[in-house]
Amino acid sequence: MNGYFLKLFNALVLLLLPAAGSLLGFNSLPNTAEIKCIETEREALLNFKQGLIDDYDMLSTWKDDENNRDCCKWKGIHCNNETGHVHMLHLRGQYPQRLRGAINITSLVPLQNIQHLDLSYNSFKGNDITELMGSFTHLIYLNLSSSYFGGSIPCELGKLTHLKYLDLSNNIYLHGQIPHQLGNLTHLRYLDLSDTDLQGELPCQLGNLTHLRYLDLGDNHLQGELPCQLGNLTHLRYLDLSYNHLHGELLCQLGNLTHLRYLDLSYNDLHGELPCQLGNLSQLRYLGLRRNSFSDETFLISSTSIMNSSSSLVFLDLSFNLLKSSTIFYWLFNSTTNLRTLYLYGNMLEGSIPDGFGKVMNSLETLDLSGNKLQGDIPSFFGNICTLERLDLSRNKLNGRFSSLFDNSSWCNRHIFKSLDLSYNRITGKLSKTIGILSELEQLYLDANLLEGDVTESHLSNFSKLESLYLSDNSLSLKFVPGWVLPFPLQSLGLRSCKLGPSFPSWLQTQHSIYSLDISDNRINDSIPEWFWNNLRIVHLNMSHNNLIGAIPNLPLKLPYRSSIILNSNHIEGKVPSFLLQARELKLSENILSDWFSFSCDQNIVANLAILDLSKNQIKGQLPDCWKSVDSLLILDLSHNNLSGKIPMSMSTLVNLKVLVLKNNNLMGELASLKNCSNLIMLDVAENMLSGPIPSWIGESMQQLIILNMRRNYFSGNLPNHLCHLKHIQLLDLSWNKLSKGIPTCLKNFTAMSERSINRSDFLNRVYWFNLTYYVVYSFIPGDYTFDITWMWKGVEQVFKNPEYLLKSIDLSNNILTGEIPKEIGYLFGLVSLNLSRNNLTGEIPSEMGSLRSLDFLDLSRNHLTGQIPTSLSEIDGLGKLDLSHNSLSGRIPSGRHFETYEASCFEGNDDLCGEQLNKSCPGDEDQRTVKPAAVNGDDCDCGFYEALYMSLGIGFFTGFWSLLGTILVWRPCRNAYLMFLNRVTHSICVWFQ
Ligand SMILES: *[C@@H]1O[C@H](CO)[C@@H](O)[C@H](O)[C@H]1NC(C)=O
Ligand SMILES: *[C@@H]1O[C@H](CO)[C@@H](O)[C@H](O)[C@H]1NC(C)=O
């Protein structure tokens, strides 16, 4: 939508201001004094009005009485001063004023002389642009933009051969293809179809519109290659095809568009070279190629390209392409450039930034090289680019000392320099006091480097405009003299791990504009002063991992909308104050809160609560029974407390809940109250005293479940067949209960477990599920969300950072299950861990288990299994831990492959087993036992652990990837997104005004 306003703006600048009036012939409004409107046209207008809903009386003059008979005087109407025909109907809405209702074009048909029709900025949801529109053949100007029109573009519009201006943009319900008949509108100068839902290829007939000055087809779903006929549009000044799915190479015919000033092809899938003909675009000021697939070759080959003659280029955006080597810098050197804005972020640029860069780029105002792999010392020449205002080198591998920035540099730009971002590099040394010469600085980001030493008031006292200061994750210590007042009004402050403690930073008391504050992990050993809460305008607050003590009083405060309060891992005691429940996210885990708060049932307080984490406290008493008012809750973690009593019925109203963790409390009773929580992807009620049967509705109504943990309770009865409906389930733990009867054969329906590897789209799907919570909740909150689960892994409880996508496990151990192990278990090809130990299972081990090639852990011990160990088990190469002990197995232990590496304890307690592992020869064996090398494989028994570790590393990679994406999406949104938007706007303004 931002793009939309921009386009609108450009449209205004291009057409309406200088040229449109005379172009369209409307600037001398006719003197209608003597002209009376034509009766049939008056009736037509009144009929047209009938269908409209006019909430704001925009059509108050359209009346059928004596005083208002002359429709030429009605608002929005102009008539021809000689014939009296209506030639202009201009009903543009103006927020909030707008028309609604039904457009009856049939009723307008009598207005046969109409030349100008503008219905833009209204709300005609449900109305199509009808083919009748094609009957107004005198139209010169047609504007139906931003009015929620739907349907497709009727090909009859191709009959409006006098049209000079056509704007159907920003109608998100408008779909279908661009009709090739639009190619008949050979007088068109302005065509805007952007921000709609158009598909298909660009019709080559658009090439007939040789008078076009402005063409905007951005923000659609257009496909295919650029038609070479685009090269016929030699009068174009503005061409925007961004945000489509166009592919292929850039056309050399684009070089014909010698009047072009603005060219935006961002967010497509274009690749290949920049054709050297682009060098003909001598007026080009704006070139947007962001997020395509342009690579180094693009710029190697086109050495004589665009920039040579395009000294007019002011704005160049090549971010999110595939640029790797620093070729691009030399390409820029060879160009006599007037660039003011250069975006190269999100490429893969390596090597160092060449020294000559600063000399050539001597008109640069904004430079963004973030998110590459740039190395070497951080160059000092940026201070010699006297026009530079914003510099972003974050997320590279730059090193060198911070002070070297000020070594050889005059900082001739110090009176305009506003933003410096060096975060996420490897910069060393102290924060030098010389940074104070950048007195106009508004944003300073130095977080996640290797800086050390003290930061005192002398470093910061020269700044007066600083709004954002990020020093997190270095080895810096902040030490201000008591009573010092920061001379700048901060809005966001990131000081994670900055050794602020031991007392609570009192200088915060004078800062009243902070909306984002991170002082986590700062060794603060103090209580939170009351002034802090009273001052609170903070939307994002993180004070976790300190030693904050005392209780938080329940103050009558109003928190900012959708705030995020993170106070976990402190020593906060007492009750949970209910004013904090106004937050969108509240994390208080790992404190010593003891009292279950008077959980607020007030809808006004809890209406926005989406994440509530009170785990690992000492909260006792019953769960409150008023969850109805918290229906926006997505994640609820109350694990590791002393909660008792039943799960209250009102929890059934948490229909949006995705994650519910009640683990390790003293909850009793049945699960009945969770029946309606059908969106759960994770349900963990382990280690309580819950009882009753496993409800069959779990399989029916919770089909999204990926993780189900009911371990260590008193659940009884059989395993219902309905469980098999859980086709997404990956982690199923029902161990340590009193479950009886057989294992259902339908478990082959656990689809997610039957996939060994995860195909990409499926994977993305799952990531989507897990990231949904992340995304939904965090799309407006900076920072990463880690989602930990603790899971029994090989008999040891382990924490997995972020949920597993590959870890697939079934644990039914320690129950009283009977019957045979169903051979259908062999379908769960993706299973990594299977524990059926300590039951009463009988029969043989199904040989189908040999197909579980992903298996790393298999425990069938302490059952009554009989027969031989199937040799197929020895084909599971990755099986790191096997336990078959204490059964009634017999015969020879398979000897193939790695099977010999298992210890005797894996087989003991089976009287009739024999084989090398047990040091026991089988009947018929000659006494030819070889001496087994001792303990050679001692480590191998644990190889599964490394595998699990590896696996979670792998997961780490994936989630890392996603949190990177997430970070790009959400990271300091107020900074980047807003800046980008501003850049787009301001630069296109420059393009047109300079
Ligand atoms: C009528 O309008 C035209 C322009 O549309 C103008 O040239 C002409 O002078 C006007 N005539 C009168 C009588 O106002
Ligand atoms: C549209 O207008 C025509 C002509 O005035 C009329 O006959 C018709 O009933 C109207 N249609 C609707 C749906 O109101």
Image: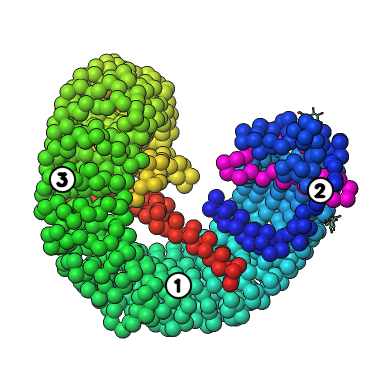
Is label 3 or label 2 in front?
2
Name the N-terminal-most of marks 3 and 2. Answer: 2
Q: Report the image quarter containing ligand 1.
A: bottom right
Residue 32: mark:
2
**Left or right, 911 with reference to 672:** left
Q: Residue at x 36, y 40 (%)?
A: 561
Q: Residue at x 60, y 58 (%)?
A: 9
- The answer to which of marks 1 and 2 sits earlier in the sequence is 2
The secondary element bearing badge 3 is classed as: loop
As drawn, the label of residue 529 is 3
At label 2, which amino acid type do we have? Thr
Q: Is residue 177 above or below residue 310?
A: above
Q: How busy is the neighbourhood of tag 1: few (under 14 within 10 Å), some, or many (20 plus)?
A: many
Q: CA distance from mark 1 to mark 2?
A: 53 Å
* Circle 1 or circle 3, nearest the eye: 3
Gap in angstroms between the C-alphas marked 3 and 2: 73 Å
Q: Which mark is residue 365?
A: 1
How busy is the neighbourhood of tag 3: few (under 14 within 10 Å), some, or many (20 plus)? some
Secondary element at image label 2: loop
Span highlighted in magenta in the image: 80-109
- At mark 1, the secondary structure is loop
- Crowd band around label 2 with a 10 angstrom C-alpha radius: few (<14), some (14–19), many (20+): some
Extreme residue toward the right, this view = 83
* Residue 98 forms part of the magenta stretch: yes
Query: Label 3 CB, ligand 2: below 8 Å?
Result: no
State which tag comes first along the sequence, 1 or 3: 1
